[in-house]
Image: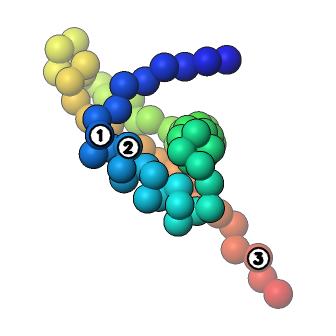
Amino acid sequence: MKLTINLEDEEVIILKKRAKKNILDLKEQVEDIIRRSCINSKNNKIVQSKCDDRLVDIFSRYKRITKKKQKINK
């Protein structure tokens, strides 16, 4: 699948530095960021608000609850 995004020059410079640090090229770095974002969003739950006003509901930020990792006892 191909996806086209427009980035500013400053953003490309930052991504190239980050890719160099991770020993990746620019394309691989962007893929890695998107992959990690998808994995993290799978673990988050959004708390639904109980607001009656639809506009307030649309423009409000929701708290995200992450699942806690279980500690392994040795």
N-terminal-most mark, 1 or 3: 1
Please tell me whether residue 45 is drawn above or below residue 3 in the rendered image.
below
55 to the left or right of 38: left
Residue nearer the viewer, 30 or 37: 30
Q: Position of residue 17 (x, y in %)?
A: 43, 59
- Neighbours of disc 2 within 10 Å: few (<14), some (14-19), many (20+): few
Please name whichever residue, 44 or 19, is drawn nearer the observer in this view of the structure.
Answer: 19
Read off the residue under disc 3. 72
Which of the numbered marks, if any, corresponds to residue 12?
2
Q: Residue at x 43, y 49 (%)?
A: 15
Tag 2 near tag 1, CB within 8 Å: yes
Q: Could one spot residue 59 in this view of the protein?
A: yes
Q: Where is residue 36? Give x, y as percent.
A: 59, 46
How far, Cα to Cα, is label 2 from label 1? Answer: 5 Å
Please give the label number shown on residue 9: 1
| Residue at 53% over, 61% down | 20
Give the spatial CA distance, label 3 vs label 2.
41 Å
Q: Quadrant of residue 69?
A: bottom right
